[in-house]
Image (cartoon, rainbow, N blue to C red):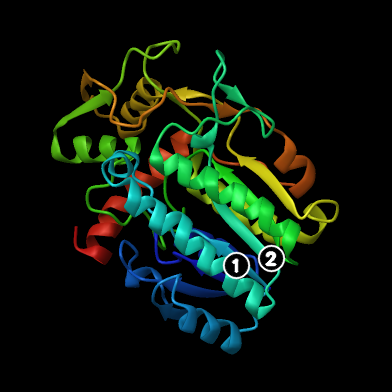
Amino acid sequence: MKVLITGGAGYIGSTVASACEDAGHEVVILDDFSTGRREFIGDRVLYEGDIADDALLDRIFSEQAIDAVVHCAARIVVPESVEDPLGYYENNVSKTITLLAALQRNGVHRFLFSSSASIYAPDENFVVTEASPLNPGSPYARTKYIVEMILEDFTKASDVRVLSLRYFNPIGTDPKLRSGQQLEKPSHVLAKLLEAWENGETFTVTGVEWPTRDGSGIRDFIHVWDLARAHVAALEGFDTATADSAYEVFNIGTGNGVTVKELAASFEAISGDPLKVTFGPPRPGDVAGVYTVSSKAKDVLGWETQLTEQEAVRDAIAWLPVRKEKLGY
């Protein structure tokens, strides 16, 4: 299968690209390098540009016999989306519409969408399935929710079939260290733990009054390599998964809820070093969190996680010197 990965030079997109190639699939990358890194491209076919560039999209589809598109290109920082909602709607929603029109125009019928578990409305146990109520709590989350609604409508009016993968909280790095977290100052929790540990600084738990077992947010931390494997399983099982419905949703998580305080404790255990920890208010747009108990991905796609959050911490620590060598920081 030949797969076009939008945002394929980023953290998740590059890891998905490696997993696809390891499984024998051919990868084509489309990235504007707003956050992606050229160092992650290797010898893959690359088209540099915007996902809303009609001329570029038509050229890609005319030059490459694309079997499926994996759409990983999006802005993803929750507090930033609160500050710049119009920018997020323009980038994540409007540009995706342009991309979908290009698929339809060029006869590409498989679309794999990077969605988010942040669209769920958690119950009192913070457990969700694909059938759980939705209530996105930030402009970022709402962009994912809106695109999902667009995709479902689009499948009813076109020949395009869609699988939406609702990610939970990817952490860690490709275990072979071919690529990893590329931002110098990323905002997610493991990156903040790594930064505090590496620099001897204090790690701040943002939000400690959530109604969870220890007051900190609860997450379903999934190793990014397991997430990448889920994309491969979805691509390989695409036609079977969409045989009865042109639009299907899959939760991609571990099924285990881990609090931020518990992740910090795991980090201390793996690193062997004590952390200086303090507590602060939640960031704008933050929510208590959810985790999934869904077995749909296993039943339909034959996928389940193989790696733990402790292994994700181990791999993230191993990536630090490689990142410094590859990226200079």
Q: Which residue position holds label 2?
A: 110
Whether 243 is drawn above or below 132: the answer is below
Choose between 87 and 31: the one closer to the eye.
87
The span from disc 2 to disc 1 (Cα, nearest Å) is: 6 Å
Choose between 185 and 310: the one closer to the eye.
185
Outermost right residue? 244
Indicate the amino acid at tag 1. Val
Which is more N-terminal, label 1 or label 2? 1
Query: Image point 19% across, 41% down: which residue?
Result: 198
Whether 37 is drawn above or below 62: the answer is above
Indicate the amino acid at tag 2. Arg
Q: Dot 1, how many residues are within 10 Å of its Cα: few (below 14), some (14-19), or many (20+)?
A: many
Q: Position of residue 268 (x, y in %)?
A: 31, 27
Q: Which residue position holds label 1?
A: 69
Left/right placement of residue 90 relative to residue 302 reads: left
Q: Secondary structure at mark 2?
A: strand
Q: Position of residue 240 (x, y in %)?
A: 82, 56
Residue 315 at least partly seen: yes
Q: Position of residue 157 (x, y in %)?
A: 73, 61
Left/right placement of residue 96 relative to residue 107 reads: left
Q: Dot 2, how many residues are within 10 Å of its Cα: few (below 14), some (14-19), or many (20+)?
A: many
Q: Quadrant of residue 131?
A: top right
User: Residues at badges 2 and 1 in contact (C-beta under 8 Å)?
Assistant: yes
Left/right placement of residue 274 relative to residue 81 reads: left
Q: Quadrant of residue 124?
A: top right
